[in-house]
Image (cartoon, rainbow, N blue to C red):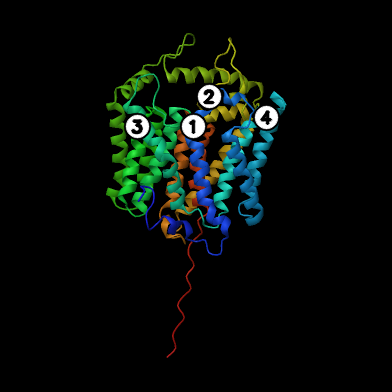
Amino acid sequence: MSVWSSPRDGLSSWRRGLGAAGDLDLLLVPFLGVMLFVRVLTDDLSAPDSRHSGSLNLSGAIAVLLMLLAGGLLLRRRRGVLPTVLAVVYLCIWTGIAVGTSGASTETLREGVREVSVIALAVIVYNAHGAVTVPSATRLVQFIGFAPALIALYQLATFTGLNRPYGTFAHPDSAAMFFGIATIASLWLYVDNGRRRSDALLTILFAAALVATFSIDGLITLVVMLTTFGALHPGSRRTKLGPCVIAGVVVLAFFALPLGARRVASVSSTRLASTGEPDSSLAWRLKKWKTLIPEWEGSPVFGQGLGTTTTTEATLKNRFAGKPPHNEYIRYLVETGVVGLSILLAALAILMRVLVRKRRIPGTLDAGALNAPTLAIVIVIGCLVDSLADNTLLNSPTCYAAALIVAAILALPGVEVRRAPTPQTA
């Protein structure tokens, strides 16, 4: 038996709640599994300057397929039409602003299409008629992350010091955030969905793979997610302390490895010099953020348009141009202005409110979704924390994993309505 499946929540959890669903629903889980597996395995195959290209590559083809399927399901099922339309209109408006800023080209449309594909994946799951349950969504994340995690650990074992391990992802920080989501999903499956040994082993595997990337952003994010999961999880003190203990072990493991300790020392000794070469990843980020502020001042209300901070070619005078800013709040401030960033933060606040309200529901129709809203809250918080110093929303695999799980949780029904027993007459 594979480490990501079991008799209780393999095919049985996939089919639970399908009812009279058609053949399309039965194919959704394997379709999403294949598409996302291919997307993750090929993430590091794109050229470093691929964001400056408008050609349709494999990742673009997968995005288009997701959008087409989502459009068909939305027209057929009509679940979540209003938020979907609002999200797409938001992306279209600021993609249009990018066209006005940089001119009409497939390169200009690239970021808007990518972000629409993330919305499309959420729409597919939300309209799946129960085909994509919370357990099956978390199993998919385990499935698509298993091979990259093993590769990252192999890269650590054969580490030469030239490149940090990254699995099959485009960057070690991208790998770290994905492994963080896979870790917390595996922990939720273990604690709230059967306490299977395979889920415990996968929790250890993904946490170890995250440590192997030597990503400080990823380390901090995982610690925040684990401690938040423990704090929000109902139950005994032992259950609450378990995730905190795991967080402590992860931190110790990170410091125990020589490169991990050196990276922390490098960041802690960063000098905030206004001139000279950056002497650490933190110094590089600070210099990049400093170059973005004048761009925002050029269009503070509506910004420059989606993708404009990453598609501008670097020049000799500004070699930071075109590089991802490693801060999603600053990126969206520059690309969408105060108005766009405010709308995005308001949408996130609404999402968190919905998840908190779902967490207060005493029961659901899906017995395999115990404490699932807590998992979604933790993932959203993790993305918000990681966005402070990473390109979280620019990493498609991370966005797909988060959207897959959160959408499955949003699709959960409310409290099961039970009819009162009919009095028996003598």
* Relative image position of residue 12 (x, y in whole percent): 43, 59
Q: Residue at x 49, y 46 (%)?
A: 33
Mark 1 neighbour density, 10 Å: few (under 14) some (14–19) many (20 or more): many
Number of the label disc, if any, that sits on residue 146: none
Judge whether residue 211 can be spotted in this image: no
Quick one: label 4 or label 3, which is nearer the N terminus? Answer: 4
Q: Judge whether 365 appears above or below 117 on screen.
A: below
Number of the label disc, if any, that sits on residue 153: 3
Quick one: label 1 or label 3, which is nearer the N terminus? Answer: 3
Mark 2 neighbour density, 10 Å: few (under 14) some (14–19) many (20 or more): many
The kind of secondary structure element at disc 3 is: helix
Q: Amino acid at mark 1?
A: Ser
Residue 316 quadrant: top right
Q: Amino acid at mark 4?
A: Thr
Tell me the mark number nearer the camera, choosing from 4 and 1: 4
State the CA–CA distance, disc 2 to disc 1.
10 Å
* Relative image position of residue 113 (x, y in whole percent): 63, 36
Judge whether residue 254 can be spotted in this image: yes
State the CA–CA distance, disc 4 to disc 2.
22 Å
State the CA–CA distance, disc 4 to disc 1.
26 Å
Dot 4 corresponds to which residue? 106
The kind of secondary structure element at disc 2 is: loop
Q: Amino acid at mark 2?
A: Pro
Dot 1 corresponds to which residue? 387
